[in-house]
Image (cartoon, grey):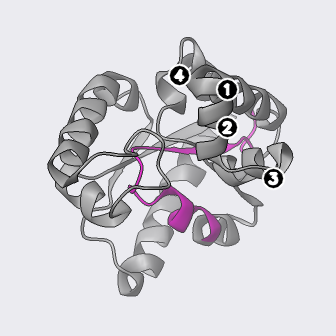
Amino acid sequence: MNERCPIWLVGMMGSGKSTLAPSLARRLGRLALDADAAIEERAGRSVAEIFEAEGETGFRDREASLIGELEQGDAVVALGGGAMSQPGMGDRLLRSGIVVFLRARPEVLLERVGRGSARPLLRGLDSAARLARLSALAKEREADYARAQITLCTEELDPSDMTEVIEGLASRIEALGRDRG
């Protein structure tokens, strides 16, 4: 594998994948892509509407197809929170690129996602139930996320820290890319 493989950003909803991807892509001279936004654009409807019409399985099929198209590229891709946990997907991501896990505690994630009305897995839940759901999902996905080559805690991340964080992350990714090449 060469140094220009995809960079897969994984983590729970609210971990900062969509926020971090464009800055990291600029630093690395790559295209940034938000998988959920790309799926919405192709489907002509929101992730929530896809979940409602096709269920999580339909959404995950769309996500897997998109990942397949991106495996030979060199984009920085913000993936949906459950992508890494789908059968066989963790292996695919690790084989094709560099996986970066963005980690944050469920309490921080809850604060970031707010009411969660646009999040199909949190829809219709009160605050306590949203926190319980985020905690359960984090626990379910923990072993999958732990397989990432790089882990970055995003709990304390704010825009003033972004440049330093991006530089450090880019250096680690570039070193991994050289080692894989």
- Residue where numbered disc 3 is placed: 41
Q: Which mark is residue 50?
A: 2
For disc 2, the neighbor class at 10 Å (few under 14, some 14 to 19, many from 20) is many
Q: Kindly indicate whether the residue at mark 2 contacts the one at mark 1 (C-beta within 8 angstroms).
A: yes
Q: Kindly indicate whether the residue at mark 3 contacts the one at mark 4 (C-beta within 8 angstroms).
A: no
Query: Which span is picked out in magenta?
Result: 1-22
- Residue where numbered disc 4 is placed: 90
Residue at the farthest left position: 128
Vertically, is 149 above or below 160? Answer: above
Quadrant that contains the C terminus: top right
105 left or right of 29 in image? left
Taking the spot 64% from the left edge, 68% from the top edge, the residue there is 22
Taking the spot 71% from the left edge, 44% from the top edge, the residue there is 3
**Label 1, label 2: how far apart the Cα atoms are:** 6 Å
Mark 1 is on which residue type? Glu
Mark 2 is on which residue type? Ile
In the foreground, 100 or 45 = 45
127 left or right of 22 in image? left
Query: Is residue 86 at least partly visible in the picture?
Result: yes
Q: Which mark is residue 54?
A: 1
72 left or right of 33 in image? right
Q: Earlier in the sequence, mark 4 or mark 1?
A: 1
Mark 3 is on which residue type? Glu
Tag nearer the camera, 1 or 3:
1
Q: Which mark is residue 105?
A: none
**Label 1, label 3: how far apart the Cα atoms are:** 16 Å
For disc 3, the neighbor class at 10 Å (few under 14, some 14 to 19, many from 20) is few
180 left or right of 116 in image? right
Asked if residue 6 is among those painted magenta in the image, a careful observer would answer yes
Choose top left, top right, bottom left or bottom right for residue 117.
bottom left
Secondary structure state at the residue bearing disc 4: helix
